[in-house]
Image: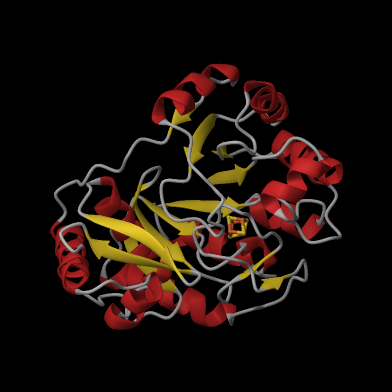
Amino acid sequence: MIGHTQEYKYLFGPVPSRRLGRSLGVDLIPYKTCSQDCVFCQLGRTPIKTITRKEYVPIRDVLDEIEAWLKKDGKADHITLSGSGEPTLHSNFGEVLRFVRENSAIKAVLLTNGSLFQMEDVCKAAHHADIVKISLSAWDQASFGWVNRPHPDLDFKQVIEAQKSFCDAFKGELWIEVFIIAGMNSISADVAKIAALAEQLKPDRIHLNTAVRPPAEDFVAPVSPERLASLCNLFHPHAEVIAHYKNRGDFEFRANKEAIYAMLKRRPCTAEDIVGAFGMHFNEVSKYLGNLLEQGQIRAERTSGSVYYKGTEIS
Ligand code: SF4
């Protein structure tokens, strides 16, 4: 079972997702290219921070892979543009969303930081999604700077105004994810400001998240589950804490998780080591690590700037 996605270059999973059930990931961006460098990013720091849109990977090859996957497997709850950076940087991401909608009954999802909606082409392309999920964790330029560390050409007010225009016209489902970091954007007065902005986007759902997996920066700390739950009341619609993923008894999920756990019981490894050992996508590995962490089977330790995972039985 391990390495079942090796035959694909741009697809990973389906991975178990806390929000999306079984989600086939489509990665359109080389690791790690993004318009932001969020302190909480689970992919680590952003080496290539850009707002330049281009065909980072050949779109024809991506569509061919999706077509092959639909014929061969085709079982997922969602097909999601996510992966090694910000998907709207790819100049043809809308083609992928359109292809999924025209060729399958699976819902097409765009996970985005929402920073590029000022660009008309980004808005047009995003309209092809069934679900768009935007991240929003700041309330002004200063907090945008310290939480999301955006590209210098991004202005928070303009970003929000552009998001409002997009959301007003968008016919699909709109979700917002707010990432709460202890001491950075966690006091009620600041969360209330984020909530006020979120309400203006008229979302269908709001999810609160916190740093349950190792973030890009070691000063990023999670808030407690109780605190996160109490902050939900500030949002309209009422926010939900993203529930821990429940293993659906999926054999493939268990087999992959057990193989990773078996390796981590023997020696500490970084996520990159596991990616290399099993030929899985980084995001896929991240899901299994998240589940093992939640269940207390492994722990994470930062040594010389790298995060190592090891079985809790190893001292
Ligand atoms: S926008 Fe997403 S991919 Fe980019 S740095 Fe932030 S969390 Fe990471």
Name the quadrant containing residue 276. bottom left
Q: Is residue 165 above or below residue 79?
A: above
Q: Position of residue 163 (x, y in %)?
A: 75, 42
43 w.r.t. 126: above or below: below
Dividing the picture into quadrants, the one containing residue 74 is bottom left
Residue name at image x 77 percent, y 50 percent? 145
Residue 47, position as x, y percentages in the image: 65, 74
Q: Position of residue 2 (x, y in %)?
A: 21, 74
Q: Is residue 209 above or below residue 195?
A: below
Residue 28 in view here: yes
- Where's the C terminus, which quadrant? bottom left
Task: Name the residue nearer the viewer: 273 or 102.
Answer: 273
Q: Nearer the viewer, residue 206 or 141?
A: 141
Q: Nearer the viewer, residue 270 or 19?
A: 270
Q: Residue at x 74, y 70 (%)?
A: 53
- The answer to whether residue 15 shows anywhere in this view is no
**Residue at horizontal 40 percent and vertical 58 percent from the top:** 104
Q: Name the residue located 41 percent from the left edge and 24 percent from the top edge.
A: 226
Q: Is residue 95 above or below residue 217?
A: below
Quadrant of image for the N terminus: bottom left
